[in-house]
Amino acid sequence: MSALAAAPGYAEDLFEVADTAARLLGGPVVVEDVDFRVLAYSAVPGQPGDEARRSAILNRRTPDRWVRWMADSGIRDRLQRDDRLVRLDPPWPSPLHRFVRPVRADDQVVGYLWLLSGEREPAPEVERLARDFAGALAPELARRGRVTGERLLRGFLDGQLSAAELADALEVEGDNACAVVLAFGGAEPPGLVRALSRYARLKPHTWLAGAVGRRTYLLHVAPDLSEVTAAQVVRETEADLGPDVRVAAGSVVRGLASATRSREEADLTLRLLQAGDRRAGCFGALRHEILVHEVVAFLRTRPVLVDGLLDGLSAHDRRHGTDYRRTLRVYLDEFGDVRRAAAALHIHANSLRYRLSRLADLAPLDLADPDARLAAHLVLAATRTP
């Protein structure tokens, strides 16, 4: 570590760090974040390179085909567990051997140190120096990753960062990329952000985790996404985060500008989940329940819209021990089918018809009017006791 510490301003100038590392390790070096975006690279005269390195430097990111290959071949999973230089044997020819070592902070991968070498196996001294460089880089890479990711997500969701600015920062095509936002509740945001960051590091493409107020969010951006993929992310994060956390996903949208709508949908879905017993869900699958829940929640804040319509039924039930409110609810739940409603109430159909005729005397309702039926159904839901 002393060699790195001697490099002037190493925390502020990763390029100087990369040059120092390249000289001591004996080959070109690249420093990347957890999403394989290039943060710095060495430029030591006389050291060789290859096409993949040039492409990564030019595009500021490891080529997509390399990232996919590392995921498919199990290299990305291995990097989450290993703390040594891992040799890559890709299907593309190169005159040089390529090694990558994870950079960890607080037992979390915060970036990668890449090395090109003419040797197939690194010498013990090279392994030791790579470990020291990774250890010294860790605080700065952790700070950059934490500050950048959370700041970007919070700025975007708060409206302080435009979709175009976010796309530039993430180096994605903002108009063509697909996105989905997940919202989480039930645990403190700092712990959730750390857990979601660990989950995302095992996945391809772009992920941002962060908190806005008391709510935690996960933004996933990729060239193509489907509702099936979003549902899979919900299931996986639900399993990872424990029984006290609620997980809600908005719809998959095309274009980062529409991700704010996905966030709003995730928020609405989370409110529904927190009002009941379910732990996870997607907006698309729960849309009708969310609509009713939001309308009912609004009605509960506006008694002027609710009071009076069914007060006569409630008063009669209290005074005489009758069950007209329940009769009306079951009748409406059964779409006005007298036989099915009577069976649900365990009474004869003629008894139900009598009750319905009495309803008209106790409440200003015309059950032949569809708007009146809808209004009565909503008022019953809004005034229902738990």
Image (cartoon, helix red, strand yellow):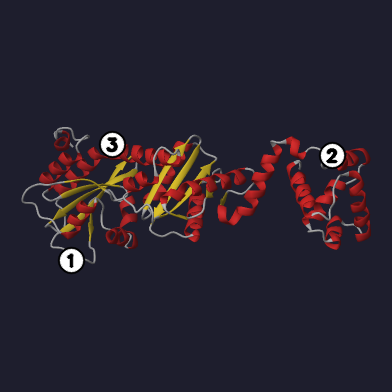
SS category of the residue bearing label 1: loop
Could you say where residue 57 lies in the image, as x and y percent from the top left? 20, 51
Q: Which mark is residue 139?
A: 3
Residue 9 image-quadrant placement: top left
- Return the residue found at the far left: 46
User: Any mark on residue 93, and which?
Assistant: 1
Q: Is residue 357 left or right of residue 217?
A: right
Mark 2: few/some/many CA within 10 Å (<14, 14-19, 20+):
some
Residue assigned mark 2: 311
Q: Residues within 10 Å of mark 3 (few under 14, many from 20)?
A: some
Task: Decide which of tag 2 and tag 3 comes sooner along the chain.
Answer: 3
Measure the alpha-carbon separation of dots 2 and 3. 65 Å
**Left or right position of 133 against 213:** left
Q: How far apart are labels 1 and 2 at the CA level?
A: 80 Å
Residue 9's tag is none
For label 1, count other residues whose C-alpha is less than 10 Å away and answer few (under 14), some (14-19) or many (20+).
few
Q: Secondary structure at mark 3?
A: helix
Mark 1 or mark 3: whose residue is earlier in sequence: 1
